[in-house]
Amino acid sequence: MSFSIVTWNINSVRLRMPLVEKFLLEKAPDVLCLQETKCPDDLFPAKAFRKLGYEHIAIHGQKGYHGVATVARRPIEMVEKRRFCEIEDSRHLSVRFEAGGKQILLHNFYVPAGGDEPDPEINPKFRHKLDFVAEMNAVRADHDEGSASILVGDLNIAPLEHDVWSHKQLLKVVSHTPVETENFEAMRKAGDWVDLMRLNVPHEQKIYTWWSYRAKDWETSDRGRRLDHIWSSQNLVPSFSGYEILREARGWDRPSDHVPVVARFDLG
């Protein structure tokens, strides 16, 4: 049995619903995880998703800011909407679903961006980001013979040298500073998570999922970063059949600055 999961920071689900519809009609994933929906729960466009066959919906929304949502063509069970750093921001939800005889726990995250100044002493947004990642150490890749875990989302950190267009030039830029990347990788390893996007990709190969709105010609300059991630528990690695970054979505009309990332699994 095969299934696919997508992560996509949509940067306002209501504003970009036509793009979401286009994507779902073309790719038809089993599960779609959205971040930065910027929409309270009562205004989430559930009717539009159900019309497209995504009848199972879990949302953790917030007016004008943040927000995550997981929609699916298969039944999902809401597990948790976790609060981080004692702040009521809507940045996480987890659901459980069945696939290939396994109960899969799926985390959907939107990690704080952290502002522009990479100094936690003078920038409370950066302090919040570091504290948030530290608390994510408690999110583990739980698994056994009948269960597995997946974690996806806009994690707002490009951890590896070739996850950014210029390692040297971005070392003092928020999302790729050493304090972020080191803590991020330590957190991933502490939870026993596998970085699926780097699993069979040469270390020196560039991977981007985000291109800034500030670039006049994003495609030509190609100054991207890998801010969106797909992780799993160890026992899903044999069934992981690959991923696709839908780069062309960055060139769609009124796009998000992030593009969808599709992960596929074959549980046999």
Image (tube, helix red, strand yellow):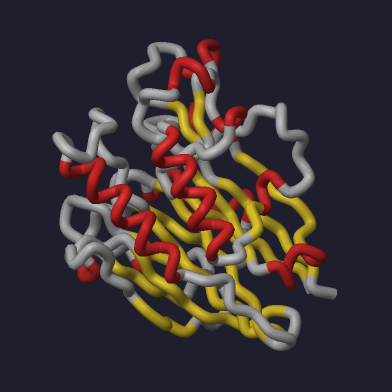
The residue that appears at 70% across and 49% down in the rendered structure is 243
Q: Could you tell me residue 231's position as x and y percent?
A: 60, 58
Q: Is residue 221 left or right of residue 201?
A: left
Q: Could you tell me residue 253's position as x and y percent?
A: 42, 30
Q: Quadrant of residue 201?
A: top right
Q: Foreground: 87 or 218?
A: 87
Instruction: Inspect this view and state whether residue 75 appears.
Output: yes
Q: Quadrant of the N terminus?
A: bottom right
Q: Foreground: 63 or 201?
A: 201
From what the image shows, is residue 18 above or below residue 34?
above
Instruction: Inspect this view and state whether residue 12 appears.
Output: no
The residue that appears at 47% across and 49% down in the rendered structure is 184
Q: Foreground: 55 or 189?
A: 189
Q: Could you tell me residue 236's position as x and y percent?
A: 73, 69
From what the image shows, is residue 190 above or below residue 197?
below
The residue that appears at 24% across and 69% down in the rendered structure is 41
From what the image shows, is residue 239 above or below residue 16?
below
The residue that appears at 45% across and 38% down in the rendered structure is 258
Q: Quadrant of residue 145?
A: bottom right
Q: In which quarter of the image is the C terminus?
A: bottom right
